[in-house]
Image (spheres, grey):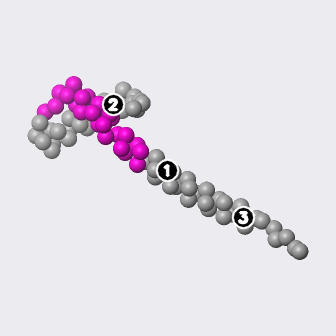
Amino acid sequence: MFIKLTKEQQQLMVSDIQTFFSQERDEELSQFAAERVLEFVKESLAPHFYNAAVMDVKHVVEQQFSSLEDEILTLELPIKR
């Protein structure tokens, strides 16, 4: 997957991973180990969250389009016969 993170974002995430392991598992993770965990999350788990977000956006856009379509139809003029 083509997730691009800035160095600052990556370092913050690595730090968060190290903090999580320290607080939740009472384990000290090296920078390298935390980077490997981050790579695993990016490659294996992030696509699931990304796809869920895409579906959420699709749903929102469909709702907005439907609403816009309804608004446009209210502009239609009646035809007298």
Query: In the rendering, which numbered label is found on residue 73?
Result: 3
Q: Which mark lies nearer to you, 1 or 2?
A: 1
Give the CA separation, mark 3 to mark 2.
Answer: 48 Å
Residue 9, position as x, y percentages in the image: 36, 32
Q: Secondary structure at mark 3?
A: helix
- The amino acid at mark 3 is Leu
- What secondary structure predominates along the stretch shown in magenta? helix
Residue 16, position as x, y percentages in the image: 25, 38
Give the CA separation, mark 1 to mark 2.
Answer: 25 Å
Q: Secondary structure at mark 1?
A: helix
- The amino acid at mark 1 is Val
Give the CA separation, mark 1 to mark 3.
Answer: 24 Å
- Foreground: 36 or 23? 36
Q: Which residues are magenta?
A: 28-52
Q: Secondary structure at mark 2?
A: helix
Q: Earlier in the sequence, mark 1 or mark 2?
A: 2
Residue 33, position as x, y percentages in the image: 20, 28
Q: Residue at x 51, y 51 (%)?
A: 58
- The amino acid at mark 2 is Gln
Q: Are marks 1 and 3 in contact (CB under 8 Å)?
A: no
Question: Which residue is label 2 attached to?
Answer: 10
Quadrant where the N terminus sits is top left
Asked if residue 59 lies in the magenta stretch, the reply is: no
Q: Residue at x 21, y 25 (%)?
A: 32
- Foreground: 40 or 15? 40
Question: Which residue is label 1 attached to?
Answer: 57
